[in-house]
Amino acid sequence: MTPMFPIVVHEATVRVFNYYFEGQICQGMCCFRKFYRLVDTFSRRDRSQACIAAQAIAHEDEQAVITASSQTYKVWLEIRSPSKPEDEPESEVAGLDSQESLNHFIT
């Protein structure tokens, strides 16, 4: 497996939102037209731990992102839909496809 290095961006350049998943309200963000879920938060003095954590969770098909602010580093992992069986129909919510639904939810 090829290691993927995290992308580092300033927190002010991303769009943060909350979403409901498995009975919990979770924090997510949109960056580079992809969606990410919050994995962990580190203080500014723990920058190296944030980098190590981001590198450890990244996979070949899932990108990790670190957002930096004046007080914290946050580690995010790309949200991917699980693979569906070929015979399972695409899910639709109120006549919208999942991407349109998520875009509507965020705005």
Image (cartoon, grey):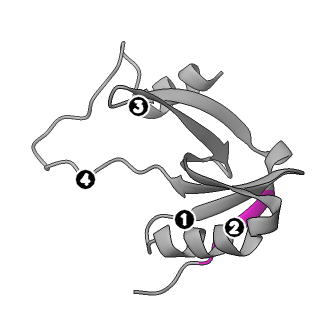
Q: Residue at x 56, y 75 (%)?
A: 55
Q: Quadrant of the N terminus?
A: bottom left
Q: Residue at x 35, y 47 (%)?
A: 81
Circle nearer the N terminus (1, 3)? 1
Give the number of the mark in front: 1 or 3: 1
Residue 89 pos. (x, y %): 18, 35
Q: Is residue 76 left or right of residue 93?
A: right
Which residue was labeled with disc 3?
98
Circle nearer the N terminus (4, 2)? 2
**Label 4 – label 2 distance at C-alpha:** 25 Å
Residue 8: within the magenta?
yes
* Predominant SS along the magenta part: strand
Q: Quadrant of the C terminus?
A: top right
Q: Residue at x 64, y 43 (%)?
A: 30
Which residue was labeled with disc 1?
63
How crowded is the residue under tag 3: few (<14 C-alpha within 10 Å), some, or many (20+)?
A: some
